[in-house]
Every structure is written in structure tokens, then in C-alpha cells.
Amino acid sequence: MTTSTPVVDGRVIGLAHYASRAVLERVLAPYGVTFQQFVTLRLAAVADGPVRTDDLVDGVVTTVKSRAADVRATVEELVDAGLLAPEEPFRVRVTDAGRGLYAKGSAETAAVATRLYAGIPEEDRAAAGRVLTLVTERANAELAALDG
């Protein structure tokens, strides 16, 4: 039986996304953080100092399409875990523990990503990147229209 290469569509994109996310969640599990917590921690860790909580929440909502209330709860979880610390007024900063966890988690996920993309020609990755960027832009426009 010969299988043809699938044409990119929502199912193919979804399968790749969920498989990759499942790997990431397993890599993060020993650190006691969820995918959403790690995304939130990342945005705080790469900031040039304390970040407005509203900006952090908006960044995560935009990135992973979560509800703002859920992201606010995630920020509180990270504060409770000592990975973020509140700053006045209405800001949080990454703690040393948060920065360390982010560095370790990032290194491990980078190693996994290297294995996932190994052997894929650069031109194929560039073509996939162009297609997925366009699909993301169009999906974001659809979301805006549905929410508008």
C-alpha cells in the first residue's frame, strides 16, 4: 500500500501541534509546571524587568488563545510557587527560581526541537513556516471577526 504525502490542512496542523505539545508537557512535568505556566513564565523571563500583569496576561491570551481569567489564575499559581513575584503597581517579575526553571526547561525543549526538526531540509521548513504564518494570520482575523 502506498501512502501519499498529505496536503497541509487543519487536521495535519493539529496532529503536529498536539504531538509536539504532548512532548513538551512531558518534558515540563518533572518541573511541576504546565504548558500554560511555562508560556507565561517565558514571557516574564524574557522581559527587561518587571512586566505589567495585564500585558503578561494579554501576551499569553494572544499566544495560546486562553481566556484572560485562566491566565490570571496561572499568574497567581506562578506567584504562589515562587516563580513570579508581585511588584507595584500591578506588575510581576520573574524570580531567580523562575529564571532557573525557565532556563532548564528551555534547554530541554530546545534539545527535543532539534531532534524533531533534524533532517528536514531548510527549504521545506521555510515553506511550512510561510504557510503556517499565513494560516495563523487568517485564523486570528477570523477570531477577531467572531469576537467583534
Image (cartoon, rainbow, N blue to C red):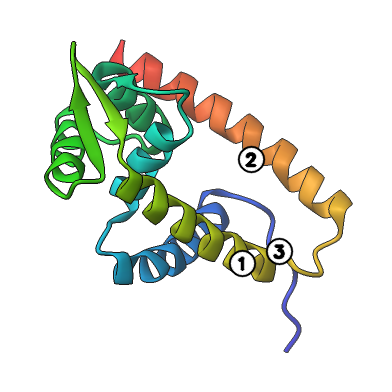
Mark 2 belongs to which amino acid? Answer: Leu
Q: Name the residue under label 2.
A: 132
x and y percent of residue 63 in the render?
42, 33
Q: Nearer the viewer, residue 105 or 114?
A: 105
x and y percent of residue 76 in the render?
13, 37
**Residue 113 vertical position relative to residue 139 in the rendered view, above or below:** below
Say few, some or many: other residues with alpha carbon within 10 Å of mark 3 (under 14 / 14 to 19 / 20 or more): few
Query: Marks 1/2: CA distance?
Result: 22 Å
Looking at the rendered image, the disc whose residue lies closer to the viewer, 3 or 1, is 1
Say few, some or many: other residues with alpha carbon within 10 Å of mark 1 (under 14 / 14 to 19 / 20 or more): few
Answer with mark 1 or mark 2, whichever residue precedes in sequence: 1
View extreme (bottom): residue: 1
**Snapshot quadrant of residue 52:** top left
Looking at the rendered image, the disc whose residue lies closer to the viewer, 1 or 2, is 1
Answer with mark 3 or mark 1, whichever residue precedes in sequence: 1
Q: Mark 3 points at which residue?
A: 117
Q: Is 67 placed left or right of 126 in the picture?
A: left
Q: Is 126 placed left or right of 68 in the picture?
A: right
Mark 3 belongs to which amino acid? Answer: Tyr
Q: Is 63 placed left or right of 32 in the picture?
A: right
Looking at the rendered image, the disc whose residue lies closer to the viewer, 2 or 3, is 3
Residue 25 numbered tag: none
Q: Mark 1 points at which residue?
A: 111
Mark 1 belongs to which amino acid? Answer: Ala
- Seen at 31% across and 10% down, the residue is 148
